[in-house]
Image: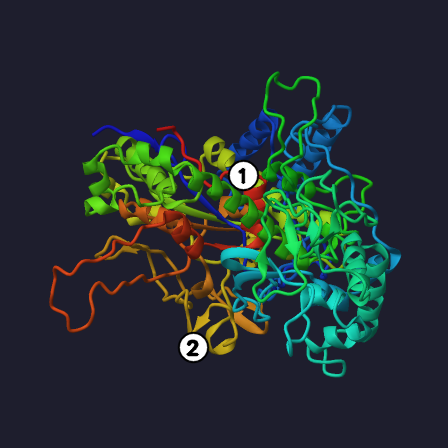
Amino acid sequence: MGRRKRKIGNEGGTVVDGSLSSCGADNGEVILDGCVDNRSVEPQPCFTTKKQAARRTSMRRANVNTPSSSTELICVLGNTEGYDSPTSVTTRRQVHRRTSMRQLNTHFKDKQLHFHRCCENGRVSLPQFQEPPLLLKQLLDSRYFTDNIRAYNQMFSMTSYGAKTDDTIDDGRSPYVFKVFGQIYHWIGSMCPQQGVPPRFLQLYIYETDHEFENRMSHFGGQYFNRLCSLVVSQLIELLDTHNELVKLFRIARDKCRDSEVPTFCVRLFSVSGSRQHALPTSDAIGAIVFDSGPRATTDYDVIVEPRGEVPRCINKLHPMYMSPQFPLMFFYGEPGFHLGLMLRDVPGSPAGRERKMTMNMYYNYQIHDRLGVYSLMLRMGRLFQQYVVMVYCSIELNRMDYIRHKQKDIRNEYLSGLYDAIDRGDQTGANVGSRTILPASFTDGPRYMYSHYLDALAICRVYENPQFFITFTCNVKWPEIARFLQPYTLLTPSDRADVVTRVFHLRVGEFVAFLKEEQPLVYSEESSMRSSFRSERIDDYISAELPDPRTDLVGYAVIYATMMHGPCGLAKSSAPCMELSDCSKKFPKLYNSKTYFDADGRAHYRRRNTGIYATRSGVKLDNSYIVHYNLLLCLTFYAHINVEFCGWTMLIKYLFKYISKGTDRVAARITRPVGNTDAQQSQVPKAIDEIQNFIDARFICPHEACWRIFNFPIHHREPAV
């Protein structure tokens, strides 16, 4: 057979899986430019122009035969004896990149910039939030307040939220992450509690306000056994009474309750503007006091707060007061949120006849963007901002599902066009036909969506054969773009600004895919068209599981140590996040291998020799047995945890789509007949299958995924198109 070239990552349709967690170098001991405080090696931005890409390619080809071409040093190397911590180095590649970035800045200096992702090219325009009081700004500059901001917000929240929160991941061993699964509800109770029940949430603003401070503190352990500061609580009570319009409305209701001559009334929160007919005027336009003798006509989403009631009421996600009562510290003035009356602006160049209604996604996408010269209280809330973006995305997702639920007749006509189609899709009896609630393939991240893309991936493999490499690209929160943005916010961590991390990672994923296509770091030639001709010795040219020698490649040693080294774990650190039942869940440390080989199942075991090269982390010496397999060129270019696996088997595609869509493991069971009853012909009521509810119960949401979806970033890409 003649020689031929095969490209992995171009025609073969490489699928890149990106995760939004920090790389495993949080406690690394790498020194950057002589500054020990940074504890990381500065990554340089990738090139974006064709001229720069061509220049970089020519430099790499010119130095391809030089063993240390990627680490040609300009400064003098320090002592590397013992390899405990790499010294500060600057490569010619880094200098070249910095020069190119200055050229890019000069190029775009006089260009007119256009913004379309945040405001739809100016069609979305919302009033700016009023600047918060000075005291609240001072509180946000306190580490104690920001660490407990969710507790303070919960203390003053007027509504309760029903959701299943996963707190097991916040055990102190990793950055804080707010994570929920299932459906989220916002509940609002009555103005007064039942007999013998202490007041909660909204009731604290109306009932027994003479003891309001004690009542609030009692829900958090009492006045003297509480981690919350009594002075801060008192100050927040005063601030909310002065500035929050919702609080003012409920204080008016309190005064009416104390007046024995006032007839029975309720509080009505408007769902649209201009709904104040036949209502007692108040100081704001968001709600009113409505008497029993007056008209009680309401719109579909109005919230009525009764004097007393046993069951709380659920606030519709389309109500403008859906978020403000839940986040009183974030919406400090009681500002209304999204509602159906919002419209887009007419701007020059917009298509004629285009729909002018503002969607919920447009509204929240505009809201969580930074703007020059505007003080955004929301984006400084840290952990509370994490909770907010999760609830925002859940609202957007549920709004889309409501539309799908109301269009089931049209969807069933498409999916269940015949009886045989119904049987193929799981309806085994005629009584079940038409009773299933379908989540169509057009819904992103749904089971049918994943399955359709899985079939497309198989079609690509039929034409271009199976992919050889499986790449996992993990976001590094120490990238300079993220660090530079967070410099003015001294108390915020990258996990507190999931929006910034998500936007930077989206840019890097695009650069990463472009790099695979243009630079072709995973291209090989083989002697035969058969897959078996790819010998194990060839894998070492693309995948490594060893620390580079710092005497010849100091930069490679520093980057791999900071991004691709696992641990310490096991007996050296039993509290490591990877530990499960006293063993490492990732099976580290690995066994040494003198060469790369394939086992009986076709899995590759990479060369991992005991070279005597090690690095020290947290006082523990880590050698090649703790290295995650990598490609050196990719790690040097993007300074991130990039795991590269050789996997030339068909089940890779199925594993990929299971991996990116996996959620909570669930088991469903149903008793079909009573125990002891052998009558198989007993009549049974068929249970309708609700695919929408099954999806909601199984999925979980974290801040980074929520921001990714709010920004409408794609979760899947395939090339070529099927």
Q: CA distance from mark 2 to mark 1?
A: 39 Å
For the question of whether residue 540 can be seen, the reply is: no
* Disc 1, SS: loop
Mark sitting earlier along the chain (2/1): 2
Asked whether 495 or 87 is in front, the reply is 495
Can you tell which of label 2 and label 1 is closer to the viewer? 1
526 left or right, relative to 394: left
- Residue 214's place in the image compared with 301, above or below, is below
Query: Which of the 4 quarters of the picture holds residue 413?
Result: top left
Q: Label 2: how many residues lie within 10 Å, few (<14), some (14-19) or many (20+)?
A: some
Q: Amino acid at mark 1?
A: Phe
Q: Which residue is mark 1?
A: 713
Q: Is residue 406 left or right of residue 123?
A: left
Query: Label 2 is placed on what type of residue?
Result: Ser
- Residue placed most toward the observer, 162 or 174: 162
Name the residue at 78% across, 72% down. 212
Where is the N terminus found, in terms of image quarters? top left
The residue at 73%/38% (across/down) is 274
Label 2 close to label 1 by CB (< 8 Å): no
Q: Quadrant of the C terminus?
A: top left
At which x and y percent is residue 681?
12, 59
Q: Secondary structure at mark 2?
A: loop
